[in-house]
Image (cartoon, rainbow, N blue to C red):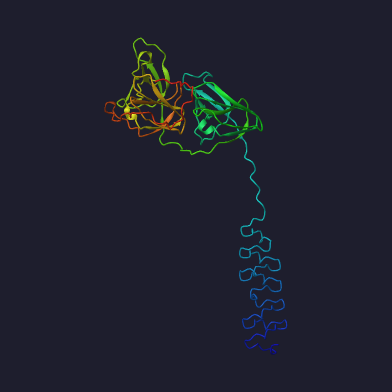
């Protein structure tokens, strides 16, 4: 026991606590009482060597900002503060989540929402418009990121409802409400080829349609759907697309009154390309725009190595020997490319489309025009190299002239 009224001369009481009474409000020389708390009374606001005071928190203050050896104070959190990032025995710290552990499970997002069909409008921009100046249907409008085709015959179609087979083959189409028909066909033909009729809950896997065809899903009434397209390596749109010019091939021989051919072309300067095709009889044609301005679409041998990438519409590339009735055709849909590769005796090329098309656009690389008389590039000898474009479907007869 301490001397009556006197302080313990700087030493603790030999391991014995002060009979329940502290020394005149002064702690024992800064040293805790051998690990034993003072009968429920804190030592002047100082914590007892990291131990809780008999189950009570230290005067409303947390223990020096540290948790009590990993244990909560009798099940109570430390004055509203979390225990240094550790949860209190399963109890969250005063509305604070337990250090990155969620207090409840997060619900799943659920199934994707079905997509509604859209009204697609056909607008005539040429001579081949069998359904009138305008027409419409309900259809799947493919995502804007896809290389869709926006023409059929002489119609511009908006939004684009035709998906090239290179993207359509491998697709899964499911109908949630309503009914729709699945077709494949060619943009230069009026008729489409039926694949399936789908109702609610039906799924159709597209496979085996011709590689130079397009896919569409159409209906007379609204429907909703889900679609999954196969992965692909999208090259993306090219820079600075060049639009085509509407063109008319007019018979240029005396007395010839055969109808014009119609379509669209990429024109060149008059010093770098030809105005006519140098063919014979009623096939001899010169090319004009809609207002009668001469066009020069027939490239010389400088076309060798020119890379053509379709950006919109349907593109046809002709590689040929000028003045003959024989040529090679390569068809392109958006984001497909072809490098012109002339094979002797071929000495020219043209970038056009199908007969009656409302137009297209392309991006070009290595296509620097040269004067026809000084065109240095020469056709190579041998067989044509494989085209980077999709080959023509067997039996298809392209609706084009040149």
Q: Which quadrant of the figure contains the C terminus?
A: top left
Q: Which quadrant of the figure contains the N terminus?
A: bottom right
Q: Position of residue 49 (x, y in %)?
A: 64, 76
Q: Position of residue 62 (x, y in %)?
A: 64, 69
Q: Is residue 331 left or right of residue 44?
A: left
Q: Identify whether 251 is placed above or below 246.
A: above
Of residues 67 and 1, which is closer to you in this image?
67
Residue at 44 percent across and 31 percent down: it is: 389
Marks counted in the figure total 0
Q: Quadrant of residue 99?
A: bottom right
Q: Quadrant of residue 281?
A: top left
Q: Position of residue 328 (x, y in %)?
A: 40, 24
The residue furthest front is: 382
The residue furthest left is: 374
Q: Quadrant of residue 286?
A: top left
Of residues 374 and 109, which is closer to you in this image?
374
Q: Position of residue 388 (x, y in %)?
A: 43, 32
The residue furthest top is: 255
Residue at 51 percent across and 32 percent down: it is: 166
Residue at 42 percent across and 18 percent down: it is: 261
Q: Is residue 270 left or right of residue 313?
A: left
Q: Identify whether 402 is placed above or below 112.
A: above
């Amino acid at each position: 026991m301490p001397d009556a009224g006197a302080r313990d001369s700087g030493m603790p009481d030999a391991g014995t606590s002060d009979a329940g009474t502290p020394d005149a409000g002064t702690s024992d020389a800064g040293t805790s009482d051998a690990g034993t708390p003072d009968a429920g009374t804190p030592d002047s606001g100082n914590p007892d060597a990291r131990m809780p005071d008999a189950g009570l928190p230290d005067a409303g203050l947390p223990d020096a900002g540290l948790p009590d050896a990993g244990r909560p104070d009798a099940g109570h959190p430390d004055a509203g503060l979390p225990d240094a990032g550790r949860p209190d025995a399963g109890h969250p710290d005063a509305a604070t989540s337990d250090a990155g552990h969620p207090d409840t499970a997060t619900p799943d997002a659920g199934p994707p929402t079905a997509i509604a069909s859209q009204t697609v409008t056909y607008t005539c921009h040429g001579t081949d418009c069998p359904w009138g100046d305008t027409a419409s249907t309900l259809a799947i409008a493919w995502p804007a990121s896809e290389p869709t085709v926006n023409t059929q015959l002489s119609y511009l179609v908006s939004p684009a409802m035709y998906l090239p087979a290179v993207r359509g083959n491998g697709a899964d189409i499911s109908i949630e409400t309503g009914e729709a028909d699945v077709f494949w066909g060619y943009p230069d033909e009026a008729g489409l080829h039926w694949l399936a009729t789908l109702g609610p809950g039906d799924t159709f896997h597209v496979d085996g349609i011709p590689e130079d065809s397009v896919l569409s899903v159409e209906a007379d009434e609204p429907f909703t759907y889900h679609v999954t397209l196969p992965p692909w390596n999208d090259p993306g749109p090219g820079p600075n697309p060049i639009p085509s010019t509407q063109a008319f091939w007019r018979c240029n021989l005396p007395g010839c009154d055969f109808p014009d051919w119609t379509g669209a072309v990429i024109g060149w300067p008059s010093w770098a390309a030809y105005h006519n095709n140098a063919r014979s009889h009623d096939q001899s044609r010169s090319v004009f725009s809609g207002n009668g301005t001469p066009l020069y679409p027939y490239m010389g041998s400088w076309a060798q190595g020119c890379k053509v990438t379709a950006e919109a519409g349907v593109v046809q590339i002709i590689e040929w020997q000028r003045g003959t009735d024989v040529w090679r055709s390569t068809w392109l849909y958006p984001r497909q490319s072809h490098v012109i590769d002339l094979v002797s005796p071929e000495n020219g090329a043209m970038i056009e489309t199908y007969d009656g098309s409302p137009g297209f656009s392309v991006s070009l690389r290595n296509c620097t025009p040269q004067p026809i008389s000084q065109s240095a590039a020469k056709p190579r000898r041998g067989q044509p190299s494989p085209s980077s474009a999709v080959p023509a479907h067997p039996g298809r007869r392209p609706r084009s002239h040149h």
